Amino acid sequence: MRWHVIDCREFYDVPRMIVAANEEGTFLFYSRFDEVIDDYASHYEVYRMPELDREVLAASWEGLERRALERRPNMPVSALPFTVKRRGNASAA
């Protein structure tokens, strides 16, 4: 499956918020900071999103997951189905 990274934010070792699309739609991958362990989660929460326009992507992403059409199973950070090379560019993992 071919992925296209639309944008990413919150880099810490890896991007912690990514909006990417494939043939199935647009997805948000979100690895939250966990106050209890004082580190980022080792997984991404995955959300299938509606199409997001430029204005939404340019604004704050805080609460972006509340726009989700559905919640998908978590995905380990190490199992991301693409490699983020730079903004708007991905290759299949």
Image: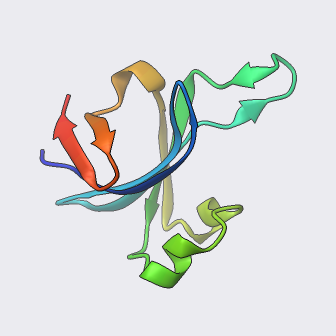
State which quadrant residue 85 falls in.
top left
Residue 5 in the image: state x and y as whole percent: 30, 53
The colour scheme applied to this rendered structure is: rainbow
Name the residue at the right extreme.
Answer: 36
74 in relation to 8, above or below? above
**Which residue is found at the position 86% from the left and 27% from the top?**
35
Quarter of the picture holding the N terminus:
top left
Residue 67 in the image: state x and y as whole percent: 58, 71
Quarter of the picture holding the C terminus:
top left
In the image, taking residue 43 as reference, residue 82 lies left or right, namely left
**Which residue is found at the position 82% from the left and 20% from the top?**
38
Residue 68 in the image: state x and y as whole percent: 53, 65
Tell me how many marks there are.
Answer: 0
In the image, taking residue 52 as reference, residue 58 lies left or right, namely right
Name the residue at the front extreme.
Answer: 86
Camera-nearest residue between 86 and 82: 86
Residue 64 in the image: state x and y as whole percent: 62, 64
In the image, taking residue 60 as reference, residue 56 lies left or right, namely left
Camera-nearest residue between 10 and 67: 10
83 in relation to 52, above or below? above
Camera-nearest residue between 79 and 16: 16
**Which residue is found at the position 24% from the left and 49% from the top?**
89
Camera-nearest residue between 87 and 72: 87
18 in relation to 23, above or below? above
